[in-house]
Image: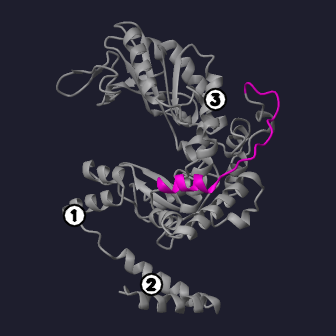
Amino acid sequence: MIKHAKDIRILLERRLRLWSECEWDILINEAVTLDKKLMNRGYGNGNDISKIFHSQMARGKVKEAMRKLMEEVDTSVLDPMKIIDDAGTTVLDDLKSKHPLPTIPDPESLHLPSGFTEIPPLLQVQVTADIVEVVARKLHGGGGPSGSKADQWADFLLRHGRSSTHLREAVAALANRLGNEDVPWDSIRALVASRLVALDKCPGVRPIGVGECLRRILAKCMAEVSGDEVTSACKGNQLAGGLSGGIEGAVHAMNKLYQEKALPNSNWGLLLVDAKNAFNSVNRIKALWYARFHWPSCSRFLYNTYKAHAELVLRGGVVNLHSREGVTQGDPLAMLLYALSTLPLIEDLKASNVQQCWYADDSSAQGSFTDLKGWWDELAKCGPDYGYFPQGQKSFLVVRDNSTVSSYLEPWIVLGCEGRKTADGLRQTPLQPEPVDALSNHLQLSDAFRARVASQGDTAS
């Protein structure tokens, strides 16, 4: 192991000489060898949790330290070639299915959003070195395909005096170029590539794109200077837009409404909807189109980073994938862009006589059973046009005890945890029924209220 300054200097001089002599094969082979050694290093076991906690606290990572201290089971990263079902499907196969081909929408569907009579002018943004410094002080996370981590970038940007100042100015200049000019894709192709990680959802696979730290810094700078436009556009219609206190207010409002309306035999319910592969399925062209109206200060930056198919790098020597549709989970701007893409759908559903609430792809609605059925039908009809595919088998219907669901919701079927049909809001167990107080304990819902919705296509179970 090389530790002393003299030895490190000799090593760097040798590698720089190889670089100047275009000895790429030697450098790549050396990097691959060293990478294998790093992968084989042990990282301790559960007995080292106190050391990990103190190490993270000393580095200022309070959130990560507390999560490590409190969590019971770590979320594991799946090997791409691991088989995940009896049919022989591998993690790689599942990842491929969750990155679909792009969908070209009908040009006539790209209409002016509500409240607009013309396309607004493109706004110039100005990111300064001070904004880069603010972002760098809050930077955290792993590295992208290059391997450079947030700690390293924070060190480069903050702890080297005048050199760090020059680097912050260079990063600000790059952000301004991406935000104000049409940049050729080939010049930023490596910048927008991400390291694709498959997390175990137990069951299922969640694809996460870990982008380059530089890209995350640039995206956070754009959110810092223009994110208020998204908040203003979304307001309370889409809580993922960043409305301060919006989630807490929505929980209390929906809870109060439910307690007032969902009386015994009132035929009132709360429908919680889950969408299939939402972030990777949203129509990218439509999302960029609506961002052009609602987020003009960042629309060029979004266009530059999403106008082509970004590479998704899988470690382990398997084939790489491409992000061709939707937004990349792990991109700091992904949540805001997704929030804007759902606004037209939310507007279309307002005609229904229900009270709806949205946070990103998680939608919910309260109303009478008949109104909820109509709202669901409209969501299942209009949602796919925007890349939103509701899943009936993963959605929940919360009802009060003694509500006569079946006569109102056919062909809906309310299932208990044992698969028995129930309409009285009780959990059906082999031994005895157990009453469940709906919407208590911060919306921790019983399996007794799982609703399977028989509807068109893949939206029904």
Q: Is 56 on the left-hand or right-hand side of 19?
A: left
Q: Earlier in the sequence, mark 1 or mark 3?
A: 1
Give the image quarter of residue 385: top right
Q: Nearer the viewer, residue 283 or 255?
A: 255
Q: Nearer the viewer, residue 401 or 17?
A: 17
| Picture disc at residue 48 | 1
Residue 342 position, x and y percent, is 61, 34
> Is 373 drawn above or below residue 119 in the view shown?
above
Residue 123 sits inside the magenta stretch: yes
Kindly give the residue lying farthest to the front in the view shown. Answer: 162
CA gap, disc 2 to disc 3?
A: 51 Å
Residue located beneath label 2 in the image: 33
Q: Earlier in the sequence, mark 1 or mark 2?
A: 2
Residue under the point 45% across and 24% down: 249
Secondary structure at badge 2 equals helix
Residue 271 position, x and y percent, is 45, 23
Secondary structure at badge 1 equals helix
Q: Counting other residues with Cα less than 10 Å from the Cα at mark 3, is it few (<14), some (14-19), or many (20 or more)?
A: some
Please state which amino acid type lies under the numbered disc 3: Leu
Residue located beneath label 3 in the image: 345
Of tags 1 and 3, the one toward the viewer is 1
Q: Are marks 2 and 3 in contact (CB under 8 Å)?
A: no
Q: Earlier in the sequence, mark 2 or mark 3?
A: 2
CA gap, disc 1 to disc 2?
A: 28 Å
Query: Predominant secondary structure in magenta?
Result: loop
